[in-house]
Image (cartoon, helix red, strand yellow):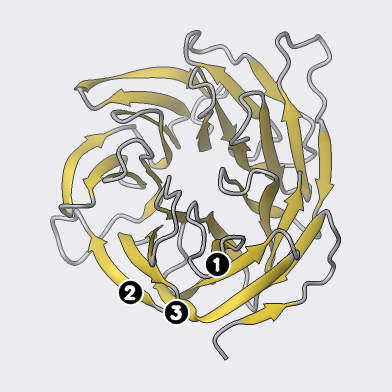
Amino acid sequence: MENSTQESQPRSANFITYESSYPLYAMALSSMPSVTNLNHQRLALGSFMEDYSNRVDIISFDPETLSIKTHPTLSFDHPYPPTKLMFQPNLKSPSSSDILASSGDYLRLWEVRESSINPLSVLNNSKTSEFCAPLTSFDWNDLEPKRIGTSSIDTTCTIWDIEKGVVETQLIAHDKEVYDIAWCEARVFASVSADGSVRIFDLRDKEHSMIIYESPQPDTPLLRLAWNKQDLRYMATILMDSNKVVILDIRSPTIPVAELERHRASVNAIAWAPHSSKHICSAGDDTQALIWELPTVVGPNGIDPLSVYLAGSEINQLQWSAALPDWIAIAFSNKMQLLKV
């Protein structure tokens, strides 16, 4: 049976739940409409099993019928749990194939066709064949789609030209493990690290970087970074074991413009709204996904969230995609839930 529609439980007009047979972590939404059905939105879901053998499943979501379709022929083995999944950005017109990238031991590219998955390439910059430094994350440059930047526990960021399959440049970006990377424009990216800093790099001047924020407590790792694509002056980061989302303005380094502190446990994921410069979503161990509207001026009592969603358990992952701006995808336990905004 090639396709099967999964009736999800629970289900309402405001959310729909997909249940996997294994714990989920990595998650991506395709920007390309399906050739066979323009309403269907493709999602990739990565398993999180403490084992070499993991899985990536491709499913599709129809926002009109609120149904999720599984595609058994689009499920494939992945070495180790993928730390991140991402479809090629800005593919607006239907095509017979889509490209999915994944990170783990290496950066891998996969061709996703209507009924098959083809491995395209394994990108490895290790000089020794025996060992590799695991990749914590990556980001695909939406202005220069041949360019992907990866972050690694070996303190480096590596910029790949995926069309040629070669390294464009590799930088020692931090003093400790690099946990996330985000592009701003074609040649500018930022990264966060276990050394507690947010640094901005420009490929036109590789000798220098700009530190725009450091953890208030020395060496408190920064785990995630999100650049506001609707207003590139702003980015957000989260600290390890912290209930705060830190909002930064790159024009005034070191001092956050806002700190969102209404989570009751550690924040695990953040995503800016794809269609608004003032909205951001955060999710964490308190089982909450919170949508925030950033005011022009922050009052003395801080900022309260605009809306609150409760999940069944700790939320590990969150995606708010331009392909599906009215829906936020969250992952917790073995479930992926789409929330109507």
Coordinates of residue 13 in the picture (x, y in percent): 84, 57
Q: Which mark is residue 48?
A: 1
User: Which of the image's four quarters has the N terminus?
Assistant: bottom right
Within the image, what quadrant is residue 257 found in?
top right
Could you tell me if residue 106 is visible in this image? no
Coordinates of residue 17 in the picture (x, y in percent): 75, 65
Disc 3 marks a residue whose amino acid type is: Ser
Q: Nearer the viewer, residue 37 or 117?
A: 37
Q: Which residue is mark 2?
A: 118
Within the image, what quadrant is residue 320 found in?
top right
Q: Is residue 307 left or right of residue 31?
A: right
Q: Residues within 10 Å of mark 3 (few under 14, many from 20)?
A: few
Disc 1 marks a residue whose amino acid type is: Phe
User: In the rendered structure, are the residues bearing label 2 and label 3 in contact, judged by CB atoms less than 8 Å apart?
Assistant: no
Q: Is residue 185 left or right of residue 4?
A: left
Q: Give how far apart the Cα atoms at labels 2 and 3 are.
A: 10 Å
Q: Which residue is mark 3?
A: 115
